[in-house]
Amino acid sequence: MSIEEIGCCGAYCGTCKAYDTTCKGCKIGFTSGERDISKAKCKIKICCVSKQQNSCSDCTQYDKCETIQSFYNHGGYKYGKYKQAVAYIKSNGYIEFLEKADKWNGAYGKY
């Protein structure tokens, strides 16, 4: 389990079934130079990686950010869970989040 496996939006790659097969994860490879951030399409990822943040929970503009807030406002259960993850990280930190998330069966779960 690694902080790098936490998506910028709050998804957790470490237990996601698509991770390492059809998905490389949100942040994996950008700090090492294996992947080029200028080729990324996700505005959330571009912002987070460019600012060298672990996730949107580190951002001082989080509450005012139209990009992440509009992402969370999509109709769908997972978006609410991702928002909940970022709030959990803000309140409890990455280590406690990882301890919970490592027991999940997918990109989100219970706290």
Image (cartoon, rainbow, N blue to C red):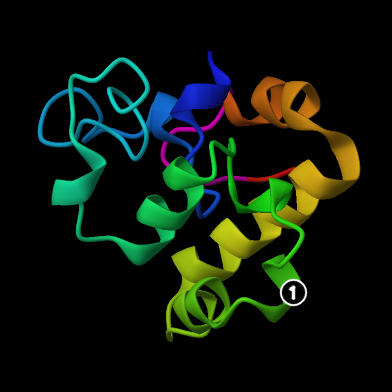
Q: Is residue 31 above or below residue 41?
A: above
Residue drawn where x is 10% and y is 35% of the image: 22
Image quadrant in which the C terminus is located = top right
In the shown orientation, is residue 24 left or right of residue 9? left
- Depth check, front residue: 43 or 102: 43
Residue 75 x %, y %: 43, 86
Residue 48 x %, y %: 49, 49
In the shown orientation, is residue 5 left or right of residue 30? right
Residue 13 x %, y %: 40, 33
- Depth check, front residue: 40 or 91: 40
Residue 104 x %, y %: 53, 32
Specify whether residue 38 is painted magenta.
no
Q: Which residue range is magenta in the image?
A: 103-109
Residue drawn where x is 53% and y is 75% of the image: 72
Q: Kindly report the secondary structure that dominates the magenta region of the rendered protein.
A: loop
Q: In which quarter of the image is residue 96?
A: top right
Specify whether residue 108 is painted magenta.
yes
Q: How many labels does the image show?
A: 1
Q: Quadrant of residue 62?
A: bottom right
Amino acid on which the number 1 mark rests in the picture: Asp
- Depth check, front residue: 102 or 51: 51
Residue drawn where x is 55% and y is 83% of the image: 66
Label 1 SS: helix
Q: Is residue 33 above or below residue 8?
A: above
Residue drawn where x is 54% and y is 45% of the image: 51
Q: In this view, does 18 lie above or below 59?
A: above
Specify few, some or many for label 1: CA neighbours under 10 Å numbering under 14, 14-19, or 20 or more: few
Say which residue label 1 marks.
63
